[in-house]
Amino acid sequence: MPLQKPKHIFIQEELERRILHGLACEWENAIWILKTSHRNRLPKPLFSLRDMKGRWGYWSGKNNEICLSRNLVLNHSWYTVREILLHEMAHQFSEQVLRACDEPPHGPGFQRACHLLRANPKASENYRPLDERSSNDSPSPEDKILVRVKKLMALAQSRNQHEADAAMTKAHELISKYNVDLLSRDNNRHFVSIFVGSPALRHFREEYRLSSLLQEYYFVYGIWVPAYVIEKGKMGRVLEISGTAQNVRMANYVHDFIKHFIDSQWGEYNKGKGLNRYRKTDFAVGILEGFRSKLRQQTKADTKISNRHGLIKLRDNLLQRHIDYKYPHTAGIRGSASRNDRDVVKDGIEVGKELIIYRGIAKKGVGKKLLN
């Protein structure tokens, strides 16, 4: 009779099995951006996990295998895992489809493969994912802006409602002014992307409303993309935001902050009521409507920006071109109509009008790391 495996070993093995299945699913999803003739010439590889030092993964043409670091898949976000996977897929494509075997590892063939697969050519060896980078890594003017915004957000923790509102308003003015000036110069700039929230098979209505708010007020582009849900062992969807590193950091933090705020406020509101999950959605949608109205009033009060742009949403043509390249085939997502409790929505609106974004949410997660 075989010995029973300790529970912690079984859990580790099951998790790694699901991760390997997820890599296979992500590989299959990623190749659909290629034209048919290229897809048909790219055989599905084996996937493995190993303990590595000094590298995130590698492609082995001899074994037709993509191997990723166990540290990577267990301790980093799924977005980062997928980013490294695409990099190794580019090595595979360069060798098996473009036949660039005699070139340097990151030579012209590999660069061409990265372009076709929308892979990051830098995502190897000493590459630092966005969730590990600090806004103080480089003393650029953009990072200095973010430092000033963080200081204002720290002031927004004031117990004095007027002082807290004033600090948050000033932070939003600074963000807006920075982006208005950036767009008016129309300089070439680097864009990054990251998942916000977690991949899931189903997303509630408030999550789509929150993604819309981020696009409208925080200068990022959001798109719901396929992503593997480890807990379910299936492909689902997740919100991916793109923009400058500074805007992505800020929008990601705001996303996590508002989600945390909704959860805490719902816990208080629902004490002794026993309301169901659908009423939480009503309450959350109300909070977002209330906060949106607050941001709208702040934007109107900012006469410099409103006079120059008439409160018309600014369009970043360079970012739009980046999105068009990265996702050439996109489709809208329509939510199903649902009945809501107007009283709960109204109560949520009143709570949302008092929402103040400040620094230092009591929650462990990528959002907080990105703003440090």
Image (tube, helix red, strand yellow):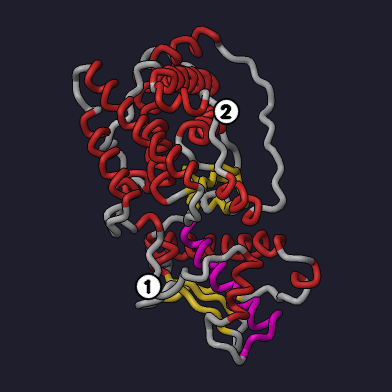
- Residue drawn where x is 57% and y is 53% of the image: 228
Direction from residue 326 to residue 305 in the image, left or right: left
Q: Is mark 1 on a helix, strand or loop?
A: loop
- Mark 1: few, some, or many residues within 10 Å (few <14, many ≥20)? few
Q: Distance between the residues labelled 2 and 1?
A: 39 Å
Q: Position of residue 78 (x, y in %)?
A: 48, 56
Inspect the image, locate mark 1, and give the three-letter code of the amino acid beneath it: Asn
Q: Would you say residue 86 sits in the magenta stretch?
A: yes
Closer to us: 262 or 222: 222
Residue 352 in sight = no
Q: 206 above or below 88?
A: above
Task: Give the quarter of the image for residue 75.
Answer: bottom left
Decide: marks 2, 1 in contact (CB < 8 A)? no
Residue corresponding to mark 2: 205
- Residue drawn where x is 80% and y is 67% of the image: 36
Inspect the image, locate mark 2, and give the three-letter code of the amino acid beneath it: Arg
How would you classify the magenta stretch by its main secondary structure?
helix
Residue corresponding to mark 1: 126
Closer to us: 24 or 159: 159
Residue 203 in sight = yes
Q: What element carries label 2?
A: helix
Which residues lie in the magenta part? Answer: 79-101
Q: 359 above or below 45?
A: above
Q: 114 above or below 11?
A: below
Q: Where is residue 103 in the image (x, y as percent from the top left)?
A: 58, 88
Q: Would you say residue 271 sits in the magenta stretch?
A: no
Q: Nearer the viewer, mark 2 or mark 1?
A: 1
- Mark 2: few, some, or many residues within 10 Å (few <14, many ≥20)? some
